């Protein structure tokens, strides 16, 4: 069976995490992704956080599946010639260099358009136009500047970053959508275009509900579903909400049996209005079904702490999985706090290809996260990441370079 992006050629100038997330997704959908790396060095992540000496790190392998790798010194005039050929033959150039790096290399957007007017040039940058546009940016900088850190954590603690890589992988996802949309538009116009996903913007997009809350706070002065209500003062900016649900159905993380020794013996419990009666029956507080202080969602808001601590008395008597089984019978929305160990061992995630075991020539077998987007006519087959420069000769031959020319480039250390 063919793949959705069969025939699409991607010139992959990405490194670290944000850009590689994007091009890995495109590769999983069938695009031919040619990763261009500095000769002798490669993507810096090949050597970062290594668990086996001399072997490509998991950081690299888990972000670069299904790609081909070529080494090329794109600052060398002969290397620039190769790059021009690649630009002519590819549909999309994806990059996440520091601001201005591509221009300094001699490949401005204007130049790229001259070489190939159908080319789509897609970039991740830390910031869009404005005071910080020239800054280099990593994950946590974006989380801080995009509103995630100021709204994450507990009221009495400092701002907190989240383990979910919303700045890097989150921006890569946004960029991938921009690229396929630009490819779709090119079908009609015949022209390429520039696509930009700024990390601050992507994080803010994922924090949209907090900008919603900023405006609710400005109008009303309080937010009744936040843990600050009703005992504490609200300031003029959205406060950190601990584990409160971001939506209209109050929720919290509650201890389960074994919490004293297992840091993940917890459950997320949502007191969804339609199942309030069922919740009261399960925890043995049937009087709350009709008690005017608890009977309606609005009446419950000032009592959320009492309600959750009563529910917790019940969850503490069950393991998180026992609680799930009971609550699911009543359609009460809840979720176990799963450790990475539990996720790695979960058979259902293996069965769907969300967690995949991959074999690598120098590292051996390792686990990775497969394509989270499942398509019935474009199945994903996760293939190991390329070794540095593994496909240099193959790609150059496809560009029309003969054996002698390739040898000359190698001797001059251009590849
Ligand atoms: N041949 C020759 N030179 C190459 C090359 C190649 N194949 N590939 C890259 N280079 C050069 C670049 O042209 C650049 O040279 P100049 O500084 O002379 O212009 C140089 O290598 C370094 O590139 P860089 O500045 O992008 O890399 P860095 O390690 O210093 O910074 C990062 C890394 C991520 C902070 C920066 O790239 C950045 O801000 N990117 C945009 C935001 C982003 O994606 N951040 C998320 C990264 S994931 O956490």
Image: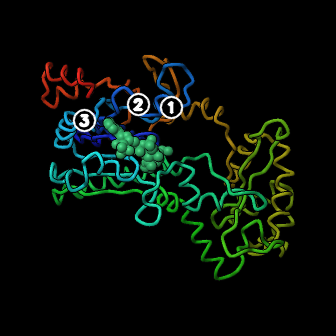
Q: Could you say where residue 195 lies in the image, as x and y percent from the top left?
A: 32, 56
Label 3 element class: loop
Who's the residue at 25% across and 39% down the image? 6
Q: In this rendering, would 31 be left or right of 166?
A: left
Q: In this rendering, would 320 be left or right of 104?
A: right
Mark 2 Cα shell of 10 Å, populated few (<14), some (14-19), many (≥20): some
Who's the residue at 72% across and 77% down the image? 222
Question: In front of the other: label 2 or label 3?
Answer: 3
Mark 1 touching mark 2, by CB under 8 A? yes
Viewer-proximal residue, 323 or 346?
346
Q: Earlier in the sequence, mark 3 or mark 1?
A: 3
Q: Earlier in the sequence, mark 1 or mark 2?
A: 1
Viewer-proximal residue, 23 or 390?
390
Label 1 element class: strand
Q: Could you say where residue 134 lies in the image, as x and y percent from the top left?
A: 43, 57
Who's the residue at 72% across and 74% down the image? 235
Q: Which residue is mark 3?
A: 76
CA distance separating discs 1 and 2: 9 Å
Q: Which residue is mark 2?
A: 382
């Amino acid at each position: 069976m063919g793949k959705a992006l069969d025939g699409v050629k991607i010139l992959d100038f990405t490194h670290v995490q944000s850009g590689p997330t994007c091009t890995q997704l495109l590769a999983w959908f069938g695009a031919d992704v040619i990763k261009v790396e500095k000769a002798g060095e490669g993507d810096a992540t090949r050597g970062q956080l290594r668990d086996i000496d001399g072997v490509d790190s998991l950081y690299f392998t888990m972000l670069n599946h299904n790609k081909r790798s070529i080494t090329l010194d794109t600052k060398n005039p002969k290397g620039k010639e190769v790059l021009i050929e690649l630009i002519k033959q590819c549909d999309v150039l994806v990059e996440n260099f520091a601001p201005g790096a591509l221009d300094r290399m001699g490949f401005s957007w204007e130049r790229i358009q001259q070489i190939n007017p159908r080319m789509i040039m897609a970039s991740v940058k830390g910031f869009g136009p404005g005071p910080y546009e020239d800054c280099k940016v990593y994950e946590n900088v974006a989380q801080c500047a995009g509103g995630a850190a100021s709204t994450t954590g507990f009221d009495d603690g400092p701002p907190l970053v989240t383990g979910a890589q919303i700045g890097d992988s989150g921006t890569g996802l946004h960029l991938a959508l921009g690229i396929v949309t630009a490819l779709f538009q090119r079908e009609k116009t015949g022209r390429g275009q520039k696509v930009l996903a700024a990390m601050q913007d992507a994080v803010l997009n994922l924090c949209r509900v907090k900008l919603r809350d900023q405006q609710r706070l400005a109008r009303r002065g309080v937010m009744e579903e936040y843990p600050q209500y009703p005992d504490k003062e609200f300031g003029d900016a959205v406060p950190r909400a601990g584990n409160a649900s971001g939506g209209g159905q109050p929720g919290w993380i509650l201890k389960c049996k074994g919490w004293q020794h297992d840091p993940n013996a917890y459950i997320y419990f949502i007191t969804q209005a339609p199942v309030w009666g069922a919740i009261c029956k399960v925890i043995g507080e049937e009087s709350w079904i009709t008690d005017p202080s608890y009977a309606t969602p609005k009446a419950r808001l000032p009592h959320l702490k009492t309600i959750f601590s009563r529910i917790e008395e019940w969850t503490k008597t069950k393991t998180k999985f026992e609680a799930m089984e009971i609550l699911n019978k009543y359609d009460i929305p809840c979720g176990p706090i799963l450790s990475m160990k539990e996720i790695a061992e979960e058979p259902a995630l293996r069965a769907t290809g969300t967690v995949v075991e991959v074999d690598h020539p120098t590292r051996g077998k390792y686990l990775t996260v497969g394509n989270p987007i499942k398509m019935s006519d474009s199945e994903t087959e996760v293939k190991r990441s390329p070794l540095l420069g593994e496909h240099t000769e193959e790609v150059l031959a496809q560009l029309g370079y003969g054996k002698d020319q390739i040898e000359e480039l190698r001797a001059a250390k251009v590849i």
